[in-house]
Amino acid sequence: MAIDETKLNEFMGKAVGDIGAALSAALVVIGDKLGLYKALAKTGPSTPLELAAKTGTHERYVREWLGNQAAGGYISYDPKSARFSLPPEQAMALAEEGSPAFIPGAFQVIAAAFAAGEKIAERFRTGEGLEWGEHHACLFEGTERFFRPGYAANLVSLWLPALEGVVAKLNQGALVADVGCGLGASAILMAQAFPKSRFRGFDIHPGSIDLARERAKAAGVEDRVTFEVAKATDFPGSNYDLVAHFDCLHDMGDPLGAARRVRKVLSPNGTWLVVEPFGGDKIEDNLNPVGRVFYGASTMLCVPNSLASK
């Protein structure tokens, strides 16, 4: 078979980029965990020694970390001063926890996918599923940290007002079910915005429910927000004014059964809110960077959970 060297070299260039990105993903997790991004954003241009001193880390490791991050364009380097800095745009994405562009959680999800590699490879052979709770713990925190900025930026200000009559009900005092609630970010945000309403979060993962309860208490809304372990097809309660599924319906083994449960427990004038990633119906519509992310997450996380839940 004839080889087009130009095409081969083009592909090898893509592969080198992916290799660098994969290795760098691990370093993003480390930089986030150790506070390197936050320290660099606060301190300004720094040498490796200065950043190490600020963060209680060792200069030799920090030096290599900074080189990697500068090579990837995550931070900037000034050869004249031999200092590294975090541009404001990168700071918004990497160092500002409340920013709508904050993305380190996505890299924690990537770490969880790598940790599950052996388990998923075996599922390729057997066709079995892998439940959400069987993944590394960094998946749960990473998922919440990834989605929470979007919820904080849009849920109360845009999504709920787009639903006819829902905000008025919430202001008066409504009963809300947050199904597939994870660590409870969406329920807590709504509870903080609508103090007269009550919220019940449900999830199949006991560990996430435990953390959600802790976070509700820390936010001071535990009197109006409860969390329970329950399936989407049989969660308790009735006459809900609002039932919400945030970025979870596609993970479920029986989404039709989940929809039927919503229909059964909604009040006569209740509303079902579904928030989902936007993907194309055809494979060719998803052959792009976003589609690549979706297919990767689907293979490692979403499909295994749905198969385990059947």
Image (spheres, rainbow, N blue to C red):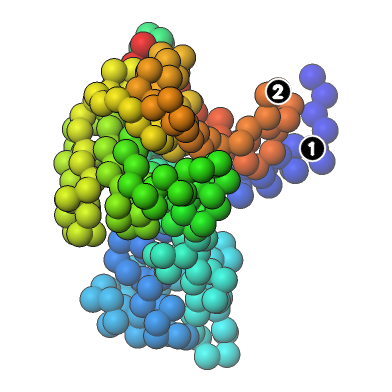
Relative to residue 58, is residue 268 depicted above or below? above
Q: Amino acid at mark 1?
A: Lys
- Can the viewer see residue 78? yes
Residue at (23% x, 59% y) in the render: 219
Q: Position of residue 188 (x, y in %)?
A: 31, 51
Q: What is the CA distance from the residue labelled 2 to the residue labelled 1?
A: 26 Å
Q: Label 1, on which residue? A: 7
Residue at (17% x, 54% y) in the render: 217
- Can the viewer see residue 117? no
Name the disc covering residue 282, or none.
2
Q: Amino acid at mark 2?
A: Lys
Q: Quadrant of the N terminus?
A: top right
Q: Secondary structure at mark 1?
A: helix
Residue at (39% x, 35% y) in the render: 241
Q: Quadrant of the C terminus?
A: top left
Specify few, some or many for label 1: CA neighbours under 10 Å numbering under 14, 14-19, or 20 or more.
Answer: few
